[in-house]
Image: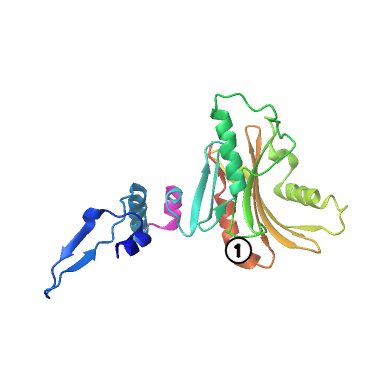
């Protein structure tokens, strides 16, 4: 029995075993289900109880409780280094390759050892700093954030209105019409402003089609301090209707934090 308890609940405390005298002559032994005490688990339980007794999901998000515990099916990701945050579906997982590269980069920055001689900067490669997607998926459904270096005085408004920027994005994707097999359509474009942080966000919705795929994208672009931030969430067109509301929620949650 002890083996079964261990298998289910992990390591248990021997002091948690108690002997209970039954009404019969035989002693009946009950092993209390004991799990090692965890401050994080207890804190999460307290937050869960608080949410269940009336704290609305929006109020919980405003308090950033979703960093510790999922709220309304979403968890908050905060990148203090790059200065942005957003929420994503609680059952999605991070791209392990990106996480490994980020860890190695951080390790190199903190290390007192000289860099390896074969180390070369990858200035011509722009890849996401973070990405999430459903576990076991093929990558067609995902969410990512790219942070690209730009000039210090760069302003996204200088390129025009959200619609003009959206049309420019479509031209870039389709090669200005040179790829006859690739078609892009701008569906929606809008401006979201945050006066408190003096930030402007261009929110774009578009779809891209080719003979081999049909994809729906929601994108948020903003610039700050010589960096262009781009959040992109994409899904196959076939599953878009069921994901539309969630993608809008993710886009609206994307904010600069510094």
Q: Name the magenta segment's main secondary structure.
A: helix
**38 or 145, nearer to the observer:** 38
Q: Is residue 36 visible?
A: yes
Residue 179: where, in percent of width, then height? 86, 54
Q: Report the quarter where the C terminus lies.
A: top right
Locate residue 113: give its quadrant: top right
**32 or 215, nearer to the observer:** 32
Q: Secondary structure at mark 1?
A: helix
Let me know if residue 249 is in the magenta part: no
Residue 26: where, in percent of width, then height? 14, 72
For the point 30% across and 62% down, which residue is it? 2
**117 or 256, nearer to the observer:** 117
Q: Which residue is mark 1?
A: 243
For the point 34% across and 59% down, which residue is it? 6
Q: Residue furthest bottom?
A: 24
For the point 37% across and 62% down, which residue is it? 8
**11 left or right, relative to 81:** left
Range of the magenta residues?
A: 55-65
**12 left or right, relative to 141:** left
Q: Is residue 73 above or below residue 238?
A: above
In this figure, what is the number of numbered marks? Answer: 1
**181 left or right, relative to 125:** right
Q: Is residue 173 above or below residue 32?
A: above
For the point 71% across and 35% down, which residue is it? 122
């Amino acid at each position: 029995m002890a083996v079964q308890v261990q298998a289910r609940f992990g390591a248990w405390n021997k002091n948690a075993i108690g002997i209970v005298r039954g009404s019969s002559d035989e002693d009946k032994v009950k092993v209390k289900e004991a799990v090692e005490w965890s401050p994080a688990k207890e804190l999460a339980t307290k937050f869960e109880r608080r949410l269940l007794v009336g704290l609305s999901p929006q109020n919980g998000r405003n308090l950033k409780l979703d960093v510790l515990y999922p709220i309304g099916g979403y968890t908050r990701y905060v990148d203090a280094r790059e200065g942005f945050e957003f929420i994503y579906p609680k059952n999605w997982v991070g791209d392990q390759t990106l996480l490994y590269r980020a860890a190695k980069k951080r390790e190199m920055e903190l290390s007192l050892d000289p860099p390896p001689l074969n180390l070369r900067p990858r200035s011509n490669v722009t890849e996401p700093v973070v990405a999430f997607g459903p576990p076991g998926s093929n990558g067609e459904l995902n969410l990512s954030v790219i942070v690209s270096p730009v000039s210090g005085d760069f302003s996204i408004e200088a390129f025009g209105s959200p619609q003009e920027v959206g049309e420019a994005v479509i031209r870039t994707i389709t090669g200005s019409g040179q790829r006859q097999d690739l078609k892009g359509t701008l569906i929606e474009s809008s401006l979201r402003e945050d006066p408190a942080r003096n930030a402007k966000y261009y929110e774009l919705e578009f779809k891209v089609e080719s003979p081999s795929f049909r994809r729906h994208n929601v994108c948020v672009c903003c610039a700050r301090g010589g960096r262009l931030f781009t959040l992109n969430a994409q899904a196959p067109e076939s599953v878009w209707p069921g994901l539309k509301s969630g993608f809008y929620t993710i886009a609206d949650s994307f904010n600069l934090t510094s």
